[in-house]
Image (tube, grey):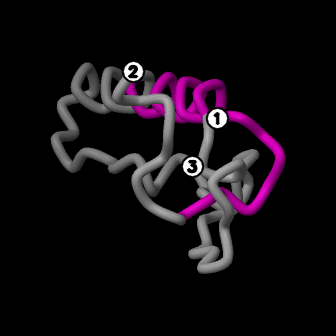
Amino acid sequence: MSRSFQKSKIFGITIAKSEKEDKRIANKKLRRLVRQKIKGKDFDLVTIRDVSNRWSFDKEGKQYWALASKKDMRK
């Protein structure tokens, strides 16, 4: 089981397991806006950062934890 331990001591700053739902919603908004712009013959497309704010996601970033024990490194 090569993936049962984390390799680095970098952890998310929250108790949320993942940002999967937030990323799914942001990409849905992006795809909708891109489709609308292409239909309107406007080829100045938007980026993912234009439609979403990373700080409003469940995880607000990551931090390095130098004192992480072996128990903390388990997934």
- Kind of residue sitting beneath label 1: Ser
Q: What stretch is highlighted in magenta?
A: 10-31
Which of the 4 image quadrants contains residue 13?
bottom right
**Is 46 a magenta residue?**
no
**Residue count near mark 2 (Cα–Cα under 10 Å), binned few <14, some 14–19, many ≥20:** few
Q: Nearer the viewer, residue 23 or 4?
A: 4
Q: Do the residues labelled 3 and 2 touch (CB within 8 Å)?
A: no
User: Which is in the foreground here, disc 3 or disc 1?
Assistant: 1
x and y, in percent, of residue 44 in the image: 21, 49
**In the rendered image, which residue does mark 1 sit on?**
18
**In the rendered image, which residue does mark 2 sit on?**
1
Secondary structure beneath label 1: loop
Q: Do the residues labelled 3 and 1 touch (CB within 8 Å)?
A: no
| Residue in view at x 50 percent, y 22 percent | 28
x and y, in percent, of residue 12 in the image: 66, 57
User: Which is in the foreground here, disc 2 or disc 1?
Assistant: 2
| Residue in view at x 22 percent, y 39 percent | 42
Q: Which mark is residue 52?
A: 3
Q: Which of marks 3 and 1 is nearer the N terminus?
A: 1
**Residue count near mark 3 (Cα–Cα under 10 Å), binned few <14, some 14–19, many ≥20:** some
Left or right? Give the position of 4 relative to 37: right
Whole-number angstrom distance, CA of label 2 to CA of label 1: 21 Å
Left or right? Give the position of 48 relative to 57: left
Whole-number angstrom distance, CA of label 3 to CA of label 2: 35 Å
The vertical placement of 52 against 19, above or below, is below
Q: Nearer the viewer, residue 24 or 16?
A: 16
- Residue reaching furthest right? 15
Secondary structure beneath label 2: loop
